[in-house]
Image (tube, helix red, strand yellow):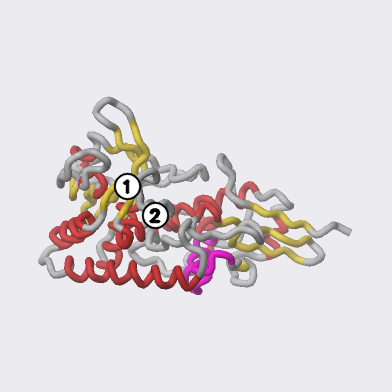
Amino acid sequence: MKQKRKTAVFLALLLVAAFCLTGVEDRAEAANTNNVRYYYDQLSAEAKSVYDAMYGMYEQGILKTGTERYDLVANGHMTQDELAACEGKYDSLLKAFGAARDAFYADYPEIFYVDFSALSITVEGNEQSGYRAYLGAKDEESVYFTKGFDGKEQVENAIKEQEAKINRIAGEAKKAETVKEQVIAAHDAILKDTVYKLETNCSEGNTGHIRTSYGALVKGESLCEGYARAVKSVLDAMGIKSVLVQGYYQESDGSRNLHMWNYVQIDGTWYGVDATANDGMEDGAASDTYLLADSSVMKEHHMPDGIMSPAGFLFTYPVLAGGS
């Protein structure tokens, strides 16, 4: 008799492969594909199934717990037969998981309380007992909270704080007549209450927040990632389509730094918005250079990279006004 097989499958740094599961195409469209899901549409049917499972955790409040697991088989995202077909080789499952994780957090930046790098996928069982697969913490000792959170009640209070700030900014910005004016108003409101900070100089207790929308919107301290996630969170609430863009900011001397910014769609045309650079970053002066900028302006310093993490999946970005 085969021994029970329990394999903790979590995202390794340089893992790439193709997913072995089949027959999930009909489930790929299970979740609501509203205007925030730009990256979902770029995934394979197999990776969409994992993304849908993450959305299930979000919708059911499981992600707020920081520890609870989500049963992929019981919730219809994959079958025992599909897991058995992998024959214990789960490298391919990791690729789908990594792509889904990157797409999900890019599409839902308001989920600031989850450290998505701490989420894993676990496969348990054998042919006799049946297979199960779970999304959650990689082991019983681990949590997937962002640093700074340690319980569901604390998370729920933080969500209320962020939602109140988003609603306030969005409500005021929507008073502007045109979509362009609304985007500018939202951008300016975020910058008004946010300062650029690093882990080395942020306020005590904020090191886990400065890369999140919560850090920018509620704590008022943020790196570029937090600025960009805050912009998208607010524009999503306003019904204005935008995406996160990851890549590099190239200085005039040719040096490059990892960076994140936004593309925003107005009347069917995409424009660049870099709230961090507009706020002056660490030493520069505030400006509106990268506020609804076209390709000719953005390409001077911004170098998009479609690989969002060591998972290795290559995403594509919208073409900006003036681009080809």
Identify which residue is drawn at 60% across, 59% down: 137
**Where in the figure is residue 17, as x and y percent of width and height?**
59, 44
Magenta region includes residue 255:
no
Question: Closer to the camera, 321 or 251?
Answer: 251
Identify which residue is drawn at 29% across, 26% down: 254
Identify which residue is drawn at 49% across, 68% down: 64
Range shown magenta: 49-67
- Examine the rendered structure and indicate whether residue 39 appears above or below residue 74: above
Q: Are marks 2 and 1 in contact (CB under 8 Å)?
A: yes
Q: Which mark is residue 206?
A: 2
Say which amino acid is labelled 2. Answer: Asn
Image quarter of the N terminus: bottom right
* Circle nearer the N terminus (2, 1): 1
Q: How many marks?
A: 2
Q: Main secondary structure of the magenta part?
A: helix
- Examine the rendered structure and indicate whether residue 187 appears above or below residue 33: above
Residue 264 placement: quadrant: bottom left
Identify which residue is drawn at 77% across, 57% down: 5
* Disc 1: which residue: 197
Distance of label 2 from label 1 (alpha carbons): 10 Å
Q: Which mark is residue 316?
A: none
The reply to whether residue 131 is visible in this rendering is yes
**Where in the figure is residue 87, as x and y percent of width and height?**
73, 52
181 relative to 211 in the view: left or right: left
52 relative to 291 in the view: left or right: right
Say which amino acid is labelled 1. Answer: Lys
**Where in the figure is residue 103, as x and y percent of width and height?**
44, 54
Label 1, secondary structure: give it: loop
